[in-house]
Amino acid sequence: MINKSIKKIILIHLFLFFGLLIKLSNEKKLSSDEKCKIVYDKKTSRYILNGKCENGVYYVNNLNGKKTSELNYDICAKKGSITRYIVISGKISSSSCINPSENEILREYTSIITARSGSGESSEVYKLFNEKTHLTEVTSTSPGYLFYCNSDNSDCSLVKNIGYYINDRNNIYSCSAYDSEVKCIKSEAESSCNTNTIGKIIFEENKNRRDDQEKFSICLNYEDSKDYKVPLTQEAGNYVVFYKEDNILGLSSNEYGIVEVKQNSVEFNNYESSMKYTYANKQSNYKVLNKGDNCPTDLNNNLLEYKCNKGICTQT
């Protein structure tokens, strides 16, 4: 009788033991299945991000299943070949890269119906966010990350260069170097170009103009009661900007900066040139001379020579 009871107890324990092993095995398999990984999706014939992933931004090459970089996503050698995944609290959103030539065409088109006209027709504008996941827009005066986004923020590209970026007169952003990265704050335009506004964006009312397209300019210098400024247009080009304290380029006294003036931005041009010296035409508001440009009529007073290193210059 005792032996039967012992056998029964042993059988019960064995049953419980094997049941526990099966449960642990299933949990391990489940955990392995839910782990964040890149898997091949037979339906789309592409690799995708799958499982429970930590919060963050992931870049996946759809063709070979390898993780890649933000730079490769921006360059996008082949349209749709790289997908950006944004994971927040278990929710995954994604967007595919756009071929640069097509992206340039898109931006060229949206600049024509620019948001600076105040019409609200532009599909892409600059927006300031707290984090690089571009989910929460900045509501304070703290520096944030500036993106060029469509209306629902599903397709955004990070602004990585120092400079000014403009939607309209009420939405101007100045971006500077903060440690090892570029961050931006919302700023305001000045009303005129003078000694106190060198290096700043100028907005001037003109009732004869129908929109804001040519109302914005960059104040490059103020000298001998003359202001040197350049309107923000598509054809503007590269110019020399003079030093002013608290400038966004990080210039020191007696230093100059090269900026690229566009239709809705003024960007620090920190290119590495094979040329040791850069020349500017004072008669053309300190425009940087390129091969084929006309020289100033008065070479002694208007042809200026600068020694530059990555966009920061000293006059020779």
Image: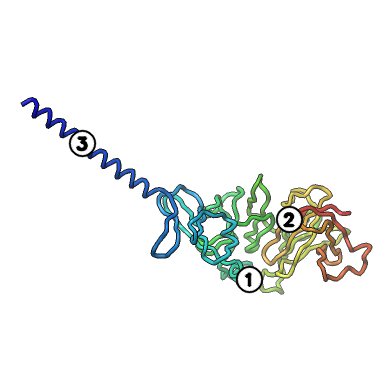
Question: At numbered mark 3, what does the secondary structure look like: helix, strand or loop?
Answer: helix
Query: Label 3, label 1: how many angstroms apart (C-alpha)?
Result: 69 Å
Q: Which of marks 3 and 2 is in front?
A: 3
* Near-viewer residue (45 or 244): 45
Query: In the rendered structure, which amino acid carries the disc numbered 1?
Result: Glu
Query: In the rendered structure, which amino acid carries the disc numbered 2?
Result: Asn
Q: Position of residue 278 (x, y in %)?
A: 83, 59
Q: Where is residue 125 in the image (x, y as percent from the top left)?
A: 59, 63
Question: At numbered mark 2, what does the secondary structure look like: helix, strand or loop?
Answer: loop
* Residue 128 placement, left or right of 195: left
Q: Where is residue 108 in the image (x, y as percent from the top left)?
A: 63, 71
Report which residue position mark 2 lands on.
Answer: 270
Q: Which of marks 3 and 1 is in front?
A: 3
| Mark 1 residue crowding within 10 angstroms, few (<14) / some (14–19) / many (20+) | few
Can residue 114 be seen in this snapshot?
no
Report which residue position mark 3 lands on.
Answer: 16
* Near-viewer residue (46 or 118): 46
* Near-viewer residue (293 or 129): 293
Query: In the rendered structure, which amino acid carries the disc numbered 3?
Result: Leu
Query: Which residue is outermost to the top?
Result: 2
Query: Label 3, label 2: how many angstroms apart (C-alpha)?
Result: 70 Å
| Mark 3 residue crowding within 10 angstroms, few (<14) / some (14–19) / many (20+) | few
**Which mark sits nearer the N-terminus, 1 or 2?**
1
Mark 3 vs 1: CB contact within 8 A = no
**Which mark sits nearer the N-terminus, 3 or 2?**
3
Q: Is residue 10 above or below residue 311?
A: above
